[in-house]
Structure formats: structure tokens, C-alpha cells
Image (tube, rainbow, N blue to C red):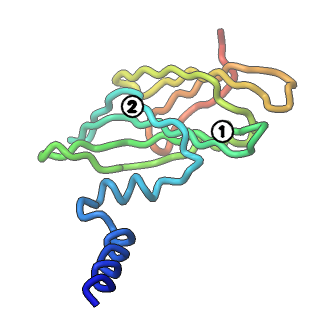
């Protein structure tokens, strides 16, 4: 009887969720598998708020992956935590059905600039693009001018 109880307890311990789980751990565990790159792109401030730009790249497609690019505004709170204030997707990039192989960003008082190098999974043509984000409702995306 005691052996059976010990085996039952051991089985419970193997399937019980970890005691240290919290909202952050749960959020990271729930992140889609296609999210392959997350990076801080610079800082922003305005309307009594301040924070950082977060760039998120998701990929899908297996052997010929294509990327989607998202820009988020993280707002820093007084207690030092951060919340997501806004999120946009750069749909023009997704429509190109290319993969991002490298990117660099910089921010200033005018917003966020991202310089993106892509590869076409069909082998047609590799391109460079520029993204200039002014606000969650205004951005410019197009072929690199360099």
C-alpha cells in the first residue's frame, strides 16, 4: 500500500506544473515557435511616456523561409517594468515573401530607422530596404536608397 502511494505521488510530481511558473515564464512558453528574432531597436519618448522600440521577426516556410517584421513600442513604467503600448506589422515586407538575413536600427527624436537586407527564397533577387517609423500610424517602407 505504501509503495503504491509513493508511486502515485511520484507520478503526480512528474506531471505537476513547476511551482516557480509566473506570468513571464508563461508568456515566453506561449510565444509562437515562428518567432526567431527579438531585438531592442532604440528608445522613444513622447506624450509623457518613454520606452524602447522592440523589433520582432517571425519566419515560416521551411526550406524557403519568409519573414514578417513587427515593431512594438514598449512603455517603461515607474516600477521599472515595461508594457506593450503599440504593435504594428510591416505588411509591405510580408507581401514581398522574402527572408530577412540582416538588419540594423537606430532611433532619434524623429522615430526609428531600420535598414534591412533580404534574400529571396526563390533565388530571384536579394534586396536592401529601409523602414522609417514615425508613429504607430505612420511609417515609410521601400527599397534602400544606397
Q: Secondary structure at mark 1?
A: strand
Q: Is residue 120 left or right of residue 116?
A: right
Q: Which residue is mark 2?
A: 40
Asked which secondary structure carries label 2, the reply is strand
Q: Examine the rendered structure and indicate whether residue 10 appears above or below residue 54.
A: below
* Disc 1 packing (10 Å; few <14; some 14–19; many ≥20): many
* Direction bottom: furthest residue: 1
Most foreground residue, 47 or 117: 117
- Tell me which numbered mark, 2 or 1, is placed earlier along the sequence: 2
Horizontal arrangement in the rendering, residue 58 relative to residue 52 (left or right): right
Q: Residue at x 51, y 20 (%)?
A: 104
The residue carrying mark 1 is 67
Tell me where residue 7 sits by quadrant.
bottom left
In the picture as drawn, the residue positioned furthest to the top comes out as: 146
Residue 44 relative to residue 28: left or right = left
Assign the N terminus to one quadrant of the image. Answer: bottom left
Q: Position of residue 44 (x, y in %)?
A: 32, 32
Q: Position of residue 65 (x, y in %)?
A: 72, 38
Label 2 – label 1 distance at C-alpha: 18 Å
At 49% from the left and 24% from the top, the residue drawn is 113
Q: How many marks?
A: 2
State the residue at coordinates (39%, 31%): 40
Residue farthest left in this picture: 79
Amino acid at each position: 500500500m505504501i509503495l503504491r502511494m509513493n508511486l502515485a505521488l511520484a507520478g503526480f510530481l512528474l506531471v505537476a506544473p513547476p511551482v516557480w511558473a509566473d506570468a513571464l515564464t508563461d508568456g515566453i512558453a506561449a510565444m509562437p515557435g515562428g518567432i526567431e528574432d527579438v531585438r531592442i531597436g532604440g528608445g522613444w519618448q513622447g506624450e509623457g511616456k518613454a520606452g524602447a522600440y522592440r523589433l520582432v521577426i517571425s519566419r515560416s516556410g521551411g526550406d524557403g523561409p519568409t519573414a514578417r517584421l513587427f515593431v512594438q513600442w514598449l512603455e517603461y513604467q515607474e516600477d521599472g517594468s515595461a508594457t506593450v503600448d503599440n504593435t504594428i506589422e510591416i505588411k509591405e515586407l510580408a507581401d514581398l515573401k522574402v527572408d530577412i538575413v540582416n538588419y540594423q536600427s537606430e532611433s532619434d527624436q524623429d522615430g526609428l530607422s531600420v535598414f534591412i537586407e533580404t534574400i529571396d527564397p526563390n533565388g530571384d533577387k536579394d534586396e536592401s530596404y529601409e523602414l522609417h517609423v514615425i508613429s504607430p500610424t505612420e511609417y515609410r517602407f521601400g527599397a534602400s536608397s544606397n
